[in-house]
Amino acid sequence: LRTRAAAVPCAMDSTDDGAPREDPLPKDDELDFVLDGLTNLDLPQPDVPLYYELWTWEGDCSILPGMWSRAVQGAFAGEAEHCTPEYFTKEFVHQPDFDTEGIFFVTHRGQCVGTCLLWPDASSTEAHARVHWLAVDHEHRRLGLGRVLLLLAIHRAKARGFNGALLRASGPRSEAVAA
């Protein structure tokens, strides 16, 4: 595992027409975590806490964009109002790189409390994936749910043949890492 404070822009940092988004590089409160050599790692299995369930993109998929939106908005408070079900559908579901086995949800008593999405990092020359929108609701942090979601994404990245994975933590780092 290595960290970096400045990142190379990826496909997620460009608009629909390919133009760069404003400020694609990490800000002062962002940090990249990079895990290399996935193909050679023996990864632990995620241990889901009691009363929590895992979901993937299956079953009634019409409810999943709403679940993603509520989880992201709950985790990022005032910074994620734009993360609507319509935004998710347009920016992710309708993109050719969307992997139905690369999105994960954690629920507690029927409510989505965490999510993450695996996405190819188009800027990487080393076949890396990006763990995108790793989010755990504030009321459900410090229970290992972020670790569960991250392990699921890393297992999926390994299964797809990616050599590495990148996670960009933003906001107060202690909260992001504690999730």
Image (cartoon, rainbow, N blue to C red):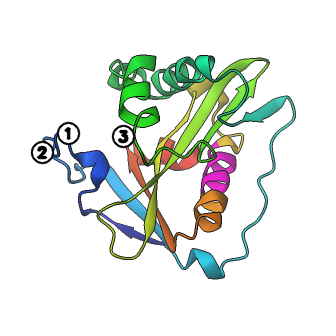
- Nearest to viewer (mark 2 / mark 3): 2
Location of residue 114 by image quarter:
top right
Looking at the image, residue 30 sits to the left or right of residue 127; the answer is: left
Query: At 46% across and 22% down in the image, what residue appears?
Result: 73
- Tell me whether circle 2 and circle 1 mark residues in contact (CB < 8 Å): yes
Distance CA(mark 2)–CA(mark 3): 25 Å
Q: Nearer the viewer, residue 121 or 116?
A: 121
Residue 76, compared with residue 164, is above or below; it is above
Image mark for residue 19: 2
Q: Position of residue 1 (x, y in %)?
A: 51, 73
Query: At 37% across and 23% down in the image, what residue appears?
Result: 87
Q: For the magenta stretch, what is the residue range?
A: 146-153
Q: Nearer the viewer, residue 46 or 173?
A: 46
Where is mark 3, residue-wise?
171
Secondary structure under the numbered disc 1 in the rendered image: loop
Q: Is residue 124 magenta?
A: no
Q: Identity of the amino acid at label 2?
A: Ala
Secondary structure under the numbered disc 2 in the rendered image: loop
Q: Position of residue 131 (x, y in %)?
A: 49, 52
Query: At 87% across and 35% down in the image, what residue appears?
Result: 50
Image mark for residue 112: none
Q: Identity of the amino acid at label 3?
A: Gly
Where is mark 1, residue-wise?
15
Secondary structure under the numbered disc 3 in the rendered image: loop
Q: Earlier in the sequence, mark 2 or mark 3?
A: 2
Query: At 17% across and 46% down in the image, what residue appears?
Result: 18
Mark 2 Cα within 10 Å, few/some/many (few <14, many 20+)? few
Residue 52, compared with residue 95, is above or below; it is above
Q: Earlier in the sequence, mark 1 or mark 3?
A: 1
Q: Is residue 152 magenta?
A: yes
Q: Identity of the amino acid at label 1?
A: Thr
